[in-house]
Image (spheres, rainbow, N blue to C red):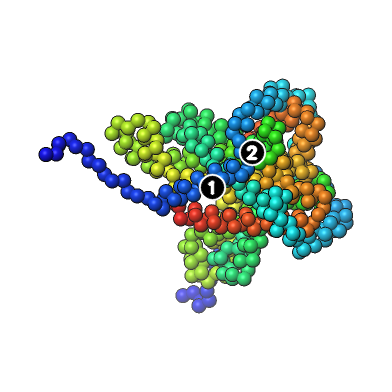
Amino acid sequence: MKADNERIVVPRPRHFKRDAIILGVTALIVGSAWFAGFDLGRIIMNFSKGGRLLGRMFLRPDWGYAPRIVDPLIETIRMSIVGTVWGAALALPVAVFAANNFIRNPWIAQPLRVILNITRSVPAMVMASVFVAVFGIGPFSGVLALIIFTFGLISKLTFESIEAIDYGQVEALLAVGANKPSILRYAIMPQILPQFLSYTLYGLEINVRAAAVLGYVGAGGIGQIFEQNLAWRNFDRVGLIIIISFFVVLAIDLVSSAIRKRLV
Amino acid sequence: MTDSKAVRIIVKKRLNPLKLVYGIINYGGLAALVIWGSSGIEYLGLMQSARGTLEALFRGFTHPDMSYLLNMSRDGLPFAIVETVAIAIAGTFASALLSIPVALLASQNIVGDKVSKLGKFIVTAVRTFPELILALIFISIVGPGAPAGILAIGIHSVGMLAKLFSEAIESMDMGVKEALDSCGATPMEVLFRAMLPEVSPEFISYTLYRFEINVRAAATLGLVGAGGIGAPLIFAIRSRVWPRVGIIMIAMIAVVTLIDIISGKLRKRLV
């Protein structure tokens, strides 16, 4: 006779597909780490060296150098503001044409989307280094890269917002016989403007970070003196530049995200 | 009776002085900001010298260096592309693993108000630290090459992934967790049997999204010597070999777009 307290064994369901996916993903990750020569042992071995370096950077930064980095820092902020504003200004009209619910002409929307995809798939740093070769060293190349990158980013986010608007207002305007510009002005714009402003601020946050490092390839801003000091192995100055730009970026981030929370 | 003509109803807008002041402050401030920003940057005198280079650049794009694309050795383009993607995969995976404990520390419904505020601040701080600077620091620690890129991406991505993860944890259904708690499950059992299964679709979706970003980042990091396609690109740009710049940029756009499409499809199926 069976005991009353015998365990009930529920056979586990088999997940061949799931197991195969997990195995495949694991193989992909391990393979990638192996291909890239990732060696955890060697990295841990090098940590004392890294600790010494970080100590030279951050424990005794060269505070006397601080006045010299004010101008490049201001240039960085200028670059990111100009890049964001022009990128966003170009993005708004393009987003209207790229959305498939306003113009409804795939011959306009699709090519625009391809262009937007291309601008977003080239990183800002890469664009900046090409522009430095073309237009020379200086903030102009950096601003150009930021404008193009911001334009691609904000256009995409905005046309997705346009496609997701509430149709009730458009229908109400159609019912009273409004034409396309009126629909744009009174139904679409009021709905997407807060989101558009929020995306613009988001773009500014990204651009401040990007502008801080663009100088590394010669595209102006604080990255340029960062690169010089790193090349001269002035680690105490490098540490100071990192610390100060960290706090400036953090401050801009906090202000911008506080505004964004109130917008949307 | 009034006449048959339709009478236009005119609604007069009343001018609100407070609103006007707000408008002047907002738009005036924005305009001032743009003017102040633009004034520091020189624009003129660049175009003349740039014209020849621009033409050469376009010729490079229309006549890309095909032999480089077909070069299967370590110096060829295929190797650089695979290395870039490998850096992105390994870095993203490392950051996803690191992000889970950090996200738990930043979630208000797991560790309470005070600890989660501290956790959130740490996450913001990590996000603020530029990837490129991390890469440069790691290059001076482990030497130039792909491992430095993996470390930089792995740490920087925690800033975004842990934030998204903790938002997923904070908005999850606590019923399953409470059910397990009431059965007397240990905290580890609650974590692995209730919480992670509940949030894993969102976690995987965010990780894939970050992977798309990290492919671009891995392409960028090579510019400073952290492995991947950026290194041959910056050499080609500095030595002005435009056909090679052309083929690298075209390959980069193709790979990034392809990965975006695949990852986007996967994400749509997940959530």
Nearer to me, B227 or B49: B227
Q: Quadrant of residue B190?
A: top left
Farthest residue, direction bottom: B4
Give SS at disc 2.
Answer: helix
- Are marks 1 and 2 in one subunit? no
Up-down relation of residue A220 to residue A62 (above or below):
below
Q: Residue furthest left?
A: A1
Taking the spot 49% from the left edge, 37% from the top edge, the residue there is B100
User: Above or below — where is A102 with respect to B72?
Assistant: below
In the image, is A68 to the left or to the right of A195?
right
User: Circle 1 is placed at which residue position?
Assistant: A28
Chain ID at mark 1: A
Q: Is residue B133 visible?
A: no
Q: Quadrant of the N terminus of chain A?
A: top left
Seen at 78% across and 24% down, the residue is A64
Q: Tell me residue B121's x, y (percent).
A: 55, 32
Q: Residue at x 63, y 43 (%)?
A: A36
Q: Position of residue B83 (x, y in %)?
A: 64, 47
In the rendered image, residue B87, in percent from the top left (x then y), is placed at 62, 44
Q: Amino acid at mark 1?
A: Leu
Callout 1: few (<14), some (14-19), or many (20+) C-alpha neighbours within 10 Å? some
Q: Position of residue A105 (x, y in %)?
A: 59, 71
- Say whether residue B4 is visible: yes
Count of numbered badges drawn on the protein? 2
Residue B191 falls left or right of residue B75: left
| Crowd band around label 2 with a 10 angstrom C-alpha radius: few (<14), some (14–19), many (20+) | many
Q: What is the quadrant of residue A188 in the picture?
A: bottom right
What residue is disc 2 on? B147
